[in-house]
Image (cartoon, rainbow, N blue to C red):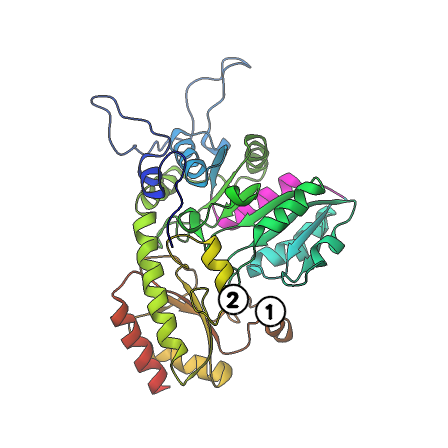
């Protein structure tokens, strides 16, 4: 995989330098935390009112510009959580009577928001299997406003090609919105593939150290402006300290992702050869149904997330989880430490068993966020847990 040349520099350069501002003599190299709720001013309509709830605190603005630079988008903003970013974007782009066409392979909370919360506001969603050929086109109505996808998907690591969906969306005057949390701007820049709005749970890889909660949105300036306006109504602005931590995480994102990818490849190859494992889902494996597509779309590597099914179902997975010594059993993902969880208890706990199985998440499915520890130590821990269970 050869990284493509990017306008404005590569992801390491952009993650460190953002929009290219060079500090003047005596200015700090690392931007300070502006830990203030309010700012002097507001003397007239032409005098912008600066207020941290509005998302225009200097620390908030700086990290938003860096997110836009990394994504190659016109504008960007950070919010207080990934679900905050998702919810504010969907609320900004839809209204009463509108309709969404979405992939059925989504993060559990996103799907619940579409199924339970948006209908209260008069917005409906049709879920489509990404592999259903003409299903996307058939699902579009006169009231459809956007198409929504994730890639790679949580937790099954399926890869959806955004390019044909971008063509379809733009042909119909719709927007294509994509959750790129698993890919990060290091592995993929969806905007270059036709995606209009990119979302991230910045709690994960963008922050990278499991010590902040944040979300991110990038896209056209007018759309990001609408999301920020919605954020001002509902209140999920990011705290300046969390914004500063997010900026710190972005500075090491590219080098961390290289290690995540290398470790995940080694771990997935080990798991695929172990007798206690029924199946492994990792885009880097030739057995993955979208391996060739992933190799075409992703740069640097295939990501740091691995899904696998333990023989013996839920009981077998429970034994493995209890036997892990180095890998932590915990929700979330994307940190420097490896984390394992069972979606039936976490991200997809609200979904019925048969619905999960239809999506490729049977009992026994384990989602592994592969950290940046030494790969041989991670493999040794998995081996002893699998052999013991």
Up-down: is 376 above or below 316?
above
Asked if residue 89 lies in the magenta stretch, the reply is yes
Residue found at x 71% / y 58%: 134
Taking depth in this image into account, of 36 and 338 the one nearest to the observer is: 338
- Identity of the residue furthest to the right in this view: 142
Q: Residues within 10 Å of mark 2 (few under 14, many from 20)?
A: many
Judge whether residue 174 can be spotted in this image: no
Q: Which residue is mark 1?
A: 359
Residue at the outermost left position: 26
Mark 2 or mark 1, earlier in chain: 2
| Residue 7 placement (x, y as % from top left) | 41, 35
> Residue 348 sits in which quadrant?
bottom right
Percent across and percent down for residue 366 are: 45, 72
Q: Is residue 42 magenta?
A: no
Q: Which residue is mark 2?
A: 156
Q: Marks 1 and 2: in contact by CB < 8 Å?
A: yes
For the point 59% across and 61% down, which residue is it?
Answer: 105
Magenta-drawn stretch, dominant element (helix, strand or loop): helix
Which residue is nearer to you in this view: 113 or 64?
A: 64
Q: Is residue 330 above or below residue 254?
A: below
Q: Is residue 116 left or right of residue 325?
A: right
* Image mark for residue 188: none
Q: What segment carries the magenta color?
A: 80-96
Query: Depth check: 353 or 75 in front?
Result: 75
Image quarter where the N terminus lies is: bottom left
Give the camera-side residue of 67 and 84.
Answer: 67
- Residue 61: percent from the left, percent from the top? 42, 31
In which quadrant will I find the C terminus?
bottom left
Q: Quadrant of residue 127?
A: bottom right
User: Residue 42: x percent and y percent?
Assistant: 49, 17
Residue 316 sits above or below residue 220 on the image: below
- Dot 2: element: loop
């Amino acid at each position: 995989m050869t990284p493509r040349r990017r306008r404005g520099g590569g992801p390491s350069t952009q993650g460190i330098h953002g929009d290219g501002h060079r500090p003047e003599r005596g200015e700090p190299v690392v931007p300070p935390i502006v830990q203030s709720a309010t700012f002097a001013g507001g003397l007239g309509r032409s005098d912008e009112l600066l207020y941290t709830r509005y998302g225009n605190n200097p620390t908030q603005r700086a990290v938003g510009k860096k997110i836009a630079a990394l994504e190659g988008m016109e504008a960007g903003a950070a919010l207080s959580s990934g679900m905050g970013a998702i919810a504010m974007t969907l609320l900004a782009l839809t209204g009463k009577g509108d309709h969404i066409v979405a992939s059925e392979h989504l993060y559990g909370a996103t799907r619940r928001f579409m199924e339970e919360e948006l209908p209260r506001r008069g917005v409906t969603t049709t879920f489509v299997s990404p592999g259903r050929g003409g299903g996307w086109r058939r699902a579009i109505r006169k009231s459809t406003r956007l198409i929504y996808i994730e890639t790679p998907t949580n937790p099954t690591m399926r890869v959806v090609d955004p390019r044909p969906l971008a063509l379809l969306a733009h042909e119909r005057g719709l927007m294509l919105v994509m959750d790129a949390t698993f890919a990060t701007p290091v592995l993929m820049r969806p905007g270059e593939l036709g995606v209009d709005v990119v979302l991230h749970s910045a709690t994960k890889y963008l922050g990278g150290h499991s010590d902040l909660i944040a979300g991110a949105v990038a896209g056209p300036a007018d759309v990001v402006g609408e999301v920020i306006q919605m954020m001002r109504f509902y209140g999920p602005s990011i705290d300046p300290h969390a914004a500063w931590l997010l900026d710190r995480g972005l500075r090491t994102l590219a080098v961390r992702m290289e290690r995540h990818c290398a470790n995940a490849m080694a771990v997935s190859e080990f798991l695929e050869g172990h007798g206690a494992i029924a199946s492994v889902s990792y885009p880097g494996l030739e057995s993955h149904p979208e391996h060739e597509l992933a190799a075409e779309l992703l740069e640097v590597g295939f990501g740091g997330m691995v899904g696998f099914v333990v023989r013996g179902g839920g009981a077998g997975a429970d034994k493995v989880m209890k036997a892990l010594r180095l890998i932590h059993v915990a929700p979330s993902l994307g940190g420097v430490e490896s984390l394992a969880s069972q979606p039936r208890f976490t991200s997809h706990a609200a979904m019925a068993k048969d619905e999960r199985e239809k999506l490729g998440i049977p009992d026994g499915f384990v989602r592994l966020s592969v950290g940046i520890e030494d790969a041989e130590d991670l493999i040794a821990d998995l081996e002893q847990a699998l052999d013991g269970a």
